[in-house]
Amino acid sequence: MQRAIRITVAVTAVAVLWLLSSSVYTVEEGQKTLVIRLGAAIKVDEQPGLKFKLPLVDSVQYYDDRLQTLAPPPEEVILGDEKRLEVETYTRYRITDPLRFYQSVRTEQQARIQLTQLVSTSLRRELGKVKIQELLSSERGKIASLIQQEVVQHAPPLGLQVTEVRLHRADLPLATSQAIYNRMKSARQQEASQLRAQGNEWAQQIRAKADSERTVILSQAQRQSAIIYGQADAQANDVMANAFRSDPGFYKFDRSLQTYREALANSAITLVLSPDAAVLHDFEHGPATPKP
């Protein structure tokens, strides 16, 4: 009997503790909560602290009250001049009305999907009015402001407050970028070929001019050399003639010695001559002295 009583008391205590723990919840700093009773939202708590609810009947949805960032994948947009761009945006938002948020989108995942659609629709509408030159100029900030204004106006029905919408990146699609790169590369290669051809033409002109100048210089140098050589020969002949006139015997003797030197240069080491050989006449008597 006592054992049954103890079991009953223990079960009752556990049930009471469970009911107490199920009837309280905590709201932390930077959070908002929504109390839902049997599927209907009945209360919003924004102040941090310990709160109470009905166990088994009430449930609590927690929402982050801080700024959050939405950065969807890049999407391709057609501009007003039919150009295609891959545009990447980011959006800063917060949940300001948990009740409306729960009634319109229920979950944060669905809210992000809805907000992404809002940004995409506004982005396509505004960029469809402009040309790529405007998007790449100082008008880009004004275009982003128009997109932000439109998203801000449509966000409150979702229980959201949008604080910022910006164009993070706007690039040409990969295929278009590659085609532009190929055209630029082809144009640069063509320009390089023209410059090389022009450089080769200039090089040939410079080489032809240098060869012509070289030929003229060599011709002038050879002509000057021939003139100097002729003048030297004339002077040498004058010197030899003067020498011959002043002492014909010595000149004849010197010529004889030159003849002997050239004739005996290739002869044997030992040369046998008779005493009355004509070759020895000049060695024996010396040059003929001129008569006074």
Image (cartoon, rainbow, N blue to C red):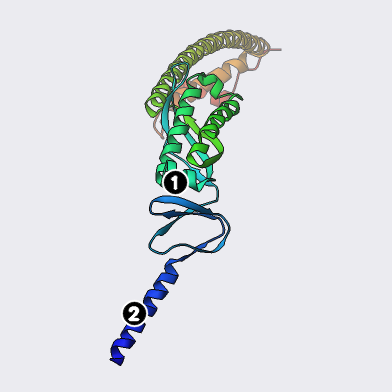
Locate residue 127, reporting x and y percent.
Answer: 49, 23
- Tell me the amino acid under the disc marked 2: Val
Q: Secondary structure at mark 2?
A: helix
Residue 11 marker: 2
Q: Nearer the viewer, mark 2 or mark 1?
A: 2
In the visual, does 241 lie left or right of 162?
A: right
- Tell me the amino acid under the disc marked 1: Tyr
Q: Secondary structure at mark 1?
A: helix
Q: Is residue 271 above or below residue 238?
A: below
Q: Residues within 10 Å of mark 1 (few under 14, many from 20)?
A: some
Using the numbered discs, state the Cα–Cα distance from disc 2 to disc 1 in whole angstroms: 37 Å
Q: Nearer the viewer, residue 229 or 223?
A: 223
Residue that lies at the very extreme toward the front in this rendered image: 1
Q: Are marks 2 and 1 in contact (CB under 8 Å)?
A: no
Query: Looking at the rendering, in which quadrant would you find the C terminus?
Result: top right
Residue that numbered label 1 is attached to: 102
The residue shown at (41%, 58%) is: 59
